[in-house]
């Protein structure tokens, strides 16, 4: 901005107006004054500052004609000869500015009509405007959006504002700095207020400020030093909004994610997407929202605190629950649409009619976009499961948890998988829904088993099988038998694994569940290989692979290819193993399964070491370890041991 407004530079630039925009407290005035100071030498006829009161509580914003009168008086125009109309004042003003080099700093501007006639036509003059509004109608201006400070800069600002030692001579604790700045949301005003809180009661030290901000109730209202209040400054923007926009601002604090779409806002407010977009535009224009990427929006943490306080004070608990319920309904529909693409042949329970409230939910374009949606919305989805549990919306809770199982299985996200299903399990039990209790126990057991916790997994499967047997649900009981077969395999009881797997396989074939039958063939093959029945294992796997290709199930295909490659390796057919591992890695990468890709890389390392290609083995195992560490999966310790051993005995490989 400084370069753009410098007369020397503007010979090749068109901008003579710089607009510094941002939320309240972000430091717009400080930036403008700093720029004016650095530019002062290039404007010999003076730098003129005026606060137009656009966003100051208790002040009436300065009108455009009043600003022109003030500027003309500054230019030595006698009040007795002051023109009466806006047009006459503007003409006189532009004439008086001609030939001068003056920099205007117009602070705290609310609207374009306050300042548009005060922008000099003289090419050697310049204007810096600060505003909490967008002022999009200022076409020729250089618009600069000022974000909160970067965390490192925010911490340094606080360090500059408070002494390095407290009054007792004890050094300042950097953890206090970090936590105070985090609570301030990197907002300069909040950091200055926090420093003022320190100066107000220095005997408490910065740790006292931290405790006041983090441990005591009050939220945003705690950020005051007796003279300045962050709450009051941020709240001023709400006064400019109509009631529909204020209601939307409050309801946004119910959204558990960091970013939200107009569709989510429409669900919260029980309105149309078009109306939600209009209201979001109003909030955006006064910097109560932040960009969230694409059509998404975000909200600064302190503004979210303000919305939460407003919500509790103004909106009834029944209305809050209804809004959260509508949002959950929308997300259930979106998650179901995404899951149907990520896991198209999964055994999926149809949603009840009342969960089809939002008919505008459209299918995801492809598996990649569906997986990206899950990753973007994971925090919100997990929070919605918990809030449904807390509201006793049991049906919402167990449906959403069940839908998320496919995503968690693919990405090996065990912690949120287990937490969501524990909530769902409690909902099923308190509602007395035996089928959902059994189904949730099945999914919970799978999460434990994949994480390597076999004892709790076995416990969940035993209880699930009892319930499915009580319900006379043969197919669901077969799912549990298949899971138990896998537990037996992991425990080394391969005969029991094959027996239970074949019992489940018979049911799947009789009921024409092709995917389940192919999965069972794959699982049986693993135990057959451990029993050294290699031809039979390979035959099962080739049949499963053909079925997965036919059904277009890439994740299941990657798993089967890896299993077949492992069978080939154990049969000393190293070339066939290597080819299958390479194919598995490609398929796993395509469908987003880092776990199966890591498994393939580990296998490629094993084949390379058998063939004496130690450098390749090291590279493949390193790739596997990176993925295993990222997912916190079992097997990382063993792979790391292989790499450490190679580094010791064959240092050239690393």
Image (cartoon, grey):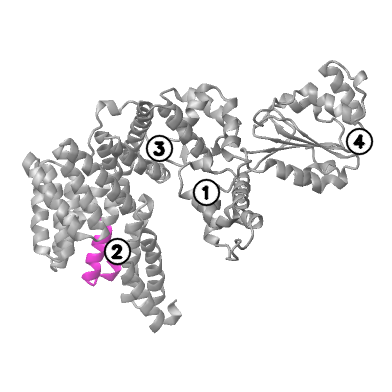
Q: Earlier in the sequence, mark 2 or mark 3?
A: 3
Mark in front: 2 vs 3: 2
Location of mark 1 (residue): 183
Location of mark 2 (residue): 634
- Tell whether 458 sits left or right of 197: left
Marks 2 and 3, how far apart in space?
Answer: 33 Å
Q: Which mark is residue 365?
A: 3
Choose top left, top right, bottom left or bottom right for residue 501.
bottom left
Q: Secondary structure at mark 3?
A: loop
Cβ atoms under marks 4 and 2 closer than 8 Å: no
Q: Which mark is residue 533?
A: none
What residue is at 32 percent from the left and 35 percent from the top? Answer: 332
Q: Is residue 246 above or below residue 25?
A: above
Q: Secondary structure at mark 4?
A: loop
Cβ atoms under marks 1 and 4 closer than 8 Å: no
What residue is at 38 percent from the left and 68 percent from the top? Answer: 620
Location of mark 4 (residue): 100
Marks 4 and 3, how far apart in space?
Answer: 59 Å
Magenta-highlighted residues: 560-578
Front-most of 423 and 195?
195
Dominant secondary structure (helix, strand or loop) of the stretch shown in magenta: helix
Q: Is residue 346 visible?
A: no
Mark in front: 1 vs 2: 1
């Amino acid at each position: 901005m400084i370069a753009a407004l410098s007369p020397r530079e503007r010979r090749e630039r068109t901008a003579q107006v710089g607009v510094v925009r941002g939320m309240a407290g972000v430091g717009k005035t400080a930036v403008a004054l700093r720029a004016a100071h650095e530019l002062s030498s290039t404007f010999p006829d003076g730098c003129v500052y005026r606060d137009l009161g656009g966003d100051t509580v208790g002040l009436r914003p300065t009108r455009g004609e009043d600003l022109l009168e003030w500027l003309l008086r500054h230019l030595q125009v006698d009040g007795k000869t002051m023109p009466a109309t806006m047009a006459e004042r503007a003409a006189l003003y532009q004439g008086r500015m001609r030939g001068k080099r003056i920099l205007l700093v117009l602070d705290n501007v609310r609207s374009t009509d306050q300042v548009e006639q005060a922008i000099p036509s003289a090419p050697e003059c310049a204007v810096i405007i600060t505003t909490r509004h967008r002022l999009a109608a200022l076409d020729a201006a250089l618009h600069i959006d000022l974000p909160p400070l970067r965390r490192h800069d925010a911490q340094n600002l606080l360090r500059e504002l408070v002494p390095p030692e407290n009054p007792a001579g004890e050094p300042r604790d950097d953890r206090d700095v970090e936590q105070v700045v985090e609570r301030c949301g990197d907002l300069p005003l909040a950091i200055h207020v926090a420093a003022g809180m320190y100066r107000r009661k220095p005997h408490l030290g910065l740790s006292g400020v931290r405790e006041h901000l983090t441990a005591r109730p009050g939220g945003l209202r705690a950020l005051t030093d007796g003279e300045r209040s962050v709450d009051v400054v941020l709240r001023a923007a709400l006064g400019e909004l109509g009631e529909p926009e204020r209601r939307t601002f409050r309801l946004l604090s119910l959204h558990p994610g960091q970013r939200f779409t107009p569709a989510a806002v429409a669900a919260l407010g029980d309105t149309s997407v078009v109306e939600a977009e209009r209201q979001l535009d109003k909030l955006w224009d006064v910097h109560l929202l932040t960009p969230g990427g694409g059509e998404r929006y975000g909200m600064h943490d302190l503004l979210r605190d303000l919305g939460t306080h407003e919500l509790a004070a103004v909106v009834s608990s029944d209305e809050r629950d209804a809004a959260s319920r509508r949002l959950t309904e929308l997300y259930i529909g979106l998650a179901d649409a995404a899951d149907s693409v990520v896991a198209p042949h999964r055994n999926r329970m149809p949603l009840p009619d009342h969960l089809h409230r939002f008919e505008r939910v459209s299918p995801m374009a492809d598996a990649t976009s569906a997986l990206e949606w899950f990753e973007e919305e994971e925090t919100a989805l997990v929070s919605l499961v918990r809030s449904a549990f807390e509201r006793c919306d049991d049906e919402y809770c167990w449906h959403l948890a069940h839908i998320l199982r496919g995503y968690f299985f693919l990405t090996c996200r065990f912690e949120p998988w287990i937490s969501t299903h524990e909530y769902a399990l409690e909902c099923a039990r308190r509602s007395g829904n035996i089928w959902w209790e059994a189904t949730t126990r099945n999914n919970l057991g799978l999460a434990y088993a994949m994480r390597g916790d076999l004892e709790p997994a076995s416990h969940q499967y035993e209880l699930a099988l009892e319930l499915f047997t009580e319900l006379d649900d043969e197919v669901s009981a077969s799912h549990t038998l298949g899971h138990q077969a896998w537990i037996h395999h992991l425990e080394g009881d391969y005969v029991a694994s094959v027996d239970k797997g074949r019992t489940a396989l018979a049911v799947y074939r009789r009921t024409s569940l092709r995917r389940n039958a192919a999965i069972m063939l794959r699982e049986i093959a693993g135990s057959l290989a451990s029993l050294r029945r290699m031809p039979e294992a390979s035959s099962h796997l080739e049949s499963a692979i053909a079925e997965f290709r036919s059904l277009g199930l890439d994740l299941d295909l990657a798993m089967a290819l890896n299993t077949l490659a492992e069978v080939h390796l154990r049969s000393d057919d190293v070339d066939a193993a290597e080819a299958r591992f390479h194919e598995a890695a490609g398929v796993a990468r395509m469908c987003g399964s880092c776990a199966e890709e890591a498994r393939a890389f580990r296998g490629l390392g094993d084949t390379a070491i058998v063939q004496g290609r130690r450098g390749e083995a090291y590279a493949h195992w390193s790739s596997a370890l990176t993925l295993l560490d990222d997912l916190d999966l079992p097997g990382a310790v063993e792979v790391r041991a292989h790499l450490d051993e190679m580094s010791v005995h064959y240092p050239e490989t690393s």
